[in-house]
Amino acid sequence: MDSARNWLSKLQQKDKVRALRRNEETSNVEGGGNDEANTDEEALSKITKQKAAAAKQYIENHYREQMKNLQERRERRIILEQKLAEADVSEEDQTNLLKYLEKKETEYMRRQRHKMGVDDFELLTMIGKGAFGEVRVCREKTTGQVYAMKKLKKSEMLRRGQVEHVKAERNLLAEVDSNCIVKLYCSFQDEDFLYLIMEYLPGGDMMTLLMRKDILTEDEARFYVAETVLAIESIHKHNYIHRDIKPDNLLLDRHGHLRLSDFGLCKPLDCSTIQESDFIVGGNSNESGESDERPAALKRTQQEQLEHWQKNRRTLAYSTVGTPDYIAPEVLLKKGYAMECDWWSLGAIMFEMLIGYPPFYSDDPMSTCRKIVNWKTHLKFPEEAKLSAEATDLISKLLCDVSHRLGSKGAGEIKEHPWFQGVDWDRIYEMEAAFIPEVNDELDTQNFEKFDESDDQCPRPSKSGPWRKPS
């Protein structure tokens, strides 16, 4: 009983203290607190005005778009009615056709209002995995249409400062309509992930093709390098720099034609621990240009280097570090770069197609970076590769200083190079591809590496695969 009385007494004392504090606060507001109250009201008023202006703008834009769509729908109906009248279609058939099309437009508008989410898709085979997330083949439940779903971790993008790059990718894909780049259909997000619903290209990627074929002939390489030129040109026309052109990002459609993907989702090497002096040739142990590579690596033949590259390629591709083999020196040095950096990457890919491994490949990424920056010392063409003079010349004019790099004045400079003699640039996407992937159906994933759903380990490369060269 005493304990209960003590508890009640303490509670009453607390209530008295609270009452005194409330009285003090009230007197402050009524007296000297008027200025603070006025300031708070002004700030609140300003914020309220901004919110009201934003809401007003949103409502105006919404109804402006609604009126525009309504007007376009009326115009389409008028045009259709005129064409039906000119085609001498009976009144009954005209009425039925108009009703059918009106129903379709209503369904389309209803779908436009529907907020897409991951639950609208059936998730199928995983065809890619990286630092940001994964890529899966998926099927939309309503229409049965097959897409590729790119699922990206928000936390990882924030940590790596890639948010603006992802926005740029989404905007570019939505804006550019080109048969040289992968199409984006829609995007949405939840609390943890961002989803991009993209065109599914069942032909695999250039990395897989190179791992299966080792080395391409110059005619085969010319076809894919030419299509890569057109793909890079298509984004440069929209004043966009890719920065991460590499075989992993060159996808192939079911007919073997090339499309560029992954705009702004590059995985740059973390160079935060490197000082600029680490890249400088002269006055240090790297003066000879050889000491950053182990002696065993220097003695490798072209075939031994190719086998070493093949062994490590897939692991590097799906690691959080990524591979810097195709990155231009000006990007690594972080001293400013422009569209020319994409043409350097093209030169590195062309070298790999014809030689079997990238021009500056080393046992570790840091050594690769040093080789790239000191490219004058390390760019060498193995004699056993037996490249044509034109191929060597083109690679040399892509892997060079920015001021002398081919393409700095536009893709036309590259297209006019003698190595591309005979290429029909206007019709190349209508021609038969150098290799035709075998695709059995719309869900076929045999041209992609297999991923274990419960294992984060990278898949082992396989040289065998369902590819055929056209006869």
Image: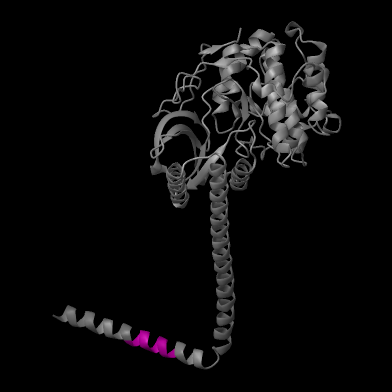
Question: Closer to the camera, 10 or 98?
Answer: 98
* 80 and 288: which is toward the camera: 80
Residue drawn at (16%, 81%) of the image: 2
Instruction: Give the residues in magenta.
Output: 16-24
405 relative to 351, above or below = below
Counting from the top left corner in percent of width and height, residue 454 is at 39, 29
Helix, strand or loop for the magenta stretch, by majority: helix
- The spot of residue 350 in percent (x, y) is 71, 20
Q: What is the basis of the colouring in this image?
A: one colour
Q: Where the N terminus falls, by quadrant?
A: bottom left
Residue at x 77% of width, y 41% of height: 335
Can residue 294 be seen? Answer: no
Residue 124 % position (x, y) = 40, 31
Q: Picture quarter containing residue 275?
A: top right
Q: Residue furthest left?
A: 1
Relative to residue 320, is residue 420 depicted above or below?
above
Front position in the image: 258 or 424: 424
Q: Is residue 177 magenta?
A: no
Residue 35 lies left or right of residue 120; in this view the side is right
Instruction: Name the quadrant containing residue 281.
Output: top right
Q: Residue furthest right?
A: 404
Question: In this rendering, would 71 be left or right of 245?
Answer: left
| Left or right, residue 267 beside residue 110 | right
Across and down, in percent, residue 291 comes to 74, 21
